[in-house]
Image (cartoon, rainbow, N blue to C red):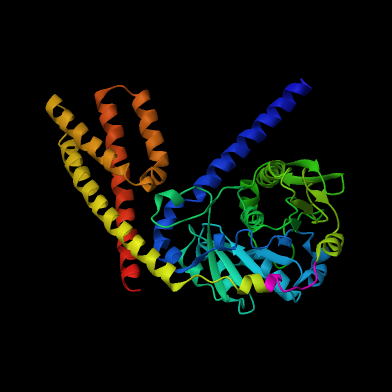
Amino acid sequence: EETMEDIKSYLERGREAAWIRFNTLNRGDAVKILDNLHNIVKTQQTSDFHNKFQGHSAIIVCPGPSLSKNIEMLKKAKGKILIICVLHAFQVLKKAGIVPDVIIHTDPFSLKDLHFERDGEEVSQWDEWIEATDFSDVSYFITSSMGAPYMFNIPANKVLWMSPGQKVGKHLPIEVFDYDRVGGSVSHSAFDLMIEFGFKSIALVGQDLAFAPDGDLYTDGAHLDMSEKRLQDMGERFLVKSFDGKEVETNNSFYYFGQSYERFANELKDSGIGLFNCTEGGMYLDGFKHCKLIDFIDSEAKEISENSIANILNNNQVSKESISSGGRSMRQYVIKNLSLANEISTFIKGAMEIAQRRDFSDHKIAKFDKLQNKVIKKMKKNYFFELGLQRELYMLQSGLGADRSLEGQVAFHIDFLKAVKKFNTIFKNALKEQFKLLSSN
């Protein structure tokens, strides 16, 4: 009976983790890149820094509750080890007098639509993390190609972009590097970058992925949503092995994030890259060496040299010719796909007119099928239709298999065409806006 309960527990945890992963991939919403076609042409891509930091080390800073234990140690690393922090750890570092070399935020959700409660009032993460913060000393801010367009205008010295999650690079007219270490959090994007940048050793700090003894999930000043609803959404709470080999409480979401790090470590075990967990609290991560941050800094810090981190960061510019060439290619892509969207609109209109008459004669059904097949054929010319209509395609296939009646079959086809029409409108409007932006530069 005890074994059965254990199996049931593992199955439930696995199911929830799988669902979290499914939602993570979809929340990435690669379709959002259509609103950034102009931005990704005019802004430098992070792939320009690949393998430029060989021989150097990096520290990824997250806002876990243990960050306060060793935040002062980061001052000793400044200038010798690259410090990259997730956006919601920046204010904590800044308050401690530490300016990271790089800030990263690749979450696709709009910060203007995300809130936390303070003194009984809702405060947007945009107001707290961006408007109320000075970025003038920050060398680089990294955003996502699938993030909100305004994230490309963060007032740091320079903004870069990366393409995490869904692999869409081959479906665009410019060269795009698709990062594929998808783990569900921004820190995983930072980790992926540090691997591709060529660092010989990488340390995690403040990556607790667990509750502190007092119940906190984040360090003071991180200003993240700790509402009861959000905690419930993060899943079941349970005990796992801790940093010091004892036990610590985590939840489904953080457990999945930890498993992603362990999977990455396993994939990199023969790479020669040193992986260190210097969080000094929270969850134990298999495949990482667990040690104090000061020990990592003492062993990995390099004296400033001609090929220093600052020099590498400052001497990697994108040419105006490259931007101009990318702009022309993207403009042609937009024109071509606007034409495609208009054709799809015409075929959908014809199919919907037949369906609305409710005439299910063989002749009309054959005509309806012909028009819908034309819609599907046209949609296959642009991968973003498949991405944007994942759920609807699944529903159509499942529905047609479940209800074999003529009325039922037609109803599922009509629902699908309505969804295509809605998405095609979004697709067309995004391209029209991008055409204006591309034409104005």
Q: Is residue 349 left or right of residue 243?
A: left
The residue positioned 30% from the left and 50% from the top of the image is 424
- Residue 404, given in percent of the width and then of the height, sits at 31, 22
Q: Nearer the viewer, residue 300 or 347?
A: 300
Q: Is residue 420 visible?
A: yes
Q: Is residue 374 left or right of residue 114?
A: left
Image quarter hosting the C terminus = bottom left
> Looking at the image, how many numbered discs can be counted on the residues?
0
Magenta span: chief secondary structure: loop
- Residue 299, given in percent of the width and then of the height, sits at 85, 61
- 261 falls in the magenta region: no
Q: Nearer the viewer, residue 376 or 314?
A: 314
Q: Is residue 18 above or below residue 208?
A: above
Q: Quadrant of residue 220?
A: bottom right
Q: Quadrant of residue 362?
A: top left
Q: Which residue is most to the front?
A: 306
Q: Which residue is most to the top?
A: 1
Image quarter hosting the N terminus = top right
Q: Is residue 5 left or right of residue 337?
A: right
Q: Is residue 118 visible?
A: no
- 309 falls in the magenta region: yes
The residue positioned 77% from the left and 69% from the top of the image is 80
Q: Is residue 301 above or below residue 7?
A: below
Range drawn in magenta: 302-310
- Residue 129, given in percent of the width and then of the height, sits at 60, 70
